Image (tube, rainbow, N blue to C red):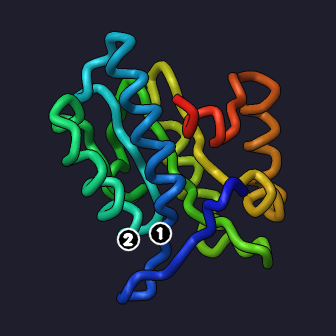
Amino acid sequence: RCDMEEVKDEEESTMNEGEAAVSIAHAKLLVESGVRAIDIGIITPYSAQVTCLKMLRNKDAKLKDLEISTVDGFQGREKEAIIISMVRSNPKKEVGFLSDHRRMNVAVTRARRQCCVVCDAETVSSDRFLKRLVEYFEENGEYLSASEYQSS
């Protein structure tokens, strides 16, 4: 878990500051490797996480064109690179409305070239569909732990 537990905001929406930091760090790496910020989107199911991500994005002028939205806000559109922040990380392994598989399918299919999933694999793997998704990414993509982002 890398000390990245979820918390609730005043409106009872869920956020995860550690995951937000990793998501922004990945977006920065993409921009540094030549992807335009306008071609990158960060999707998350929780409005509190959108707010947290936007606060972090606003600290870096190179990321000002990076789009951050909820899953529903991205419906019907695509970006070259999509970063999905799943947010949920808790000892009870509760996934909340990540269990809405239709929504998760929409999120994953927004990416044209790269889809990056930022999640607590232990928590989200309590859901069978999400477990298969995480396993697919582990087997077919590049797998990095959050600590590898924190050291860069």
CB under 8 Å between callouts 2 and 1? yes
Q: Read off the residue under disc 1.
A: 15
Mark 2 surroundings: few (<14), some (14-19) or many (≥20) residues within 10 A = many
Which residue occupies the extreme top position in the image?
A: 34
Whole-Å distance between the Cαs marked 2 and 1? 5 Å
Residue beneath the point at 42% across and 56% down: 71
| As drawn, 40 above or below 58 | above
Mark 1 surroundings: few (<14), some (14-19) or many (≥20) residues within 10 A = many
Residue beneath the point at 56% across and 39% down: 150
Residue beneath the point at 68% across and 31% down: 144
x and y percentages locating residue 42 in the rendered image: 39, 44
Q: How many marks?
A: 2
x and y percentages locating residue 116 in the rendered image: 55, 34
Q: Amino acid at mark 1?
A: Met
Q: Read off the residue under disc 2.
A: 48
Quarter containing the N terminus: bottom right
Badge 2 or badge 1: first in the primary sequence: 1
Q: Nearest the camera: 74 or 76?
A: 74
Q: Which of the 4 image quarters holds residue 25?
A: top left
Q: Amino acid at mark 2?
A: Ala
Disc marking residue 115: none
In-image side of 64 versus 17 (left or right): left
Residue beneath the point at 27% across and 54% down: 54
| As drawn, 86 above or below 89 | above
Q: Nearest the camera: 3 or 71?
A: 3
Q: Secondary structure at mark 2?
A: helix
Q: Which of the 4 image quarters holds residue 151?
A: top right
In-image side of 62 versus 71 (left or right): left
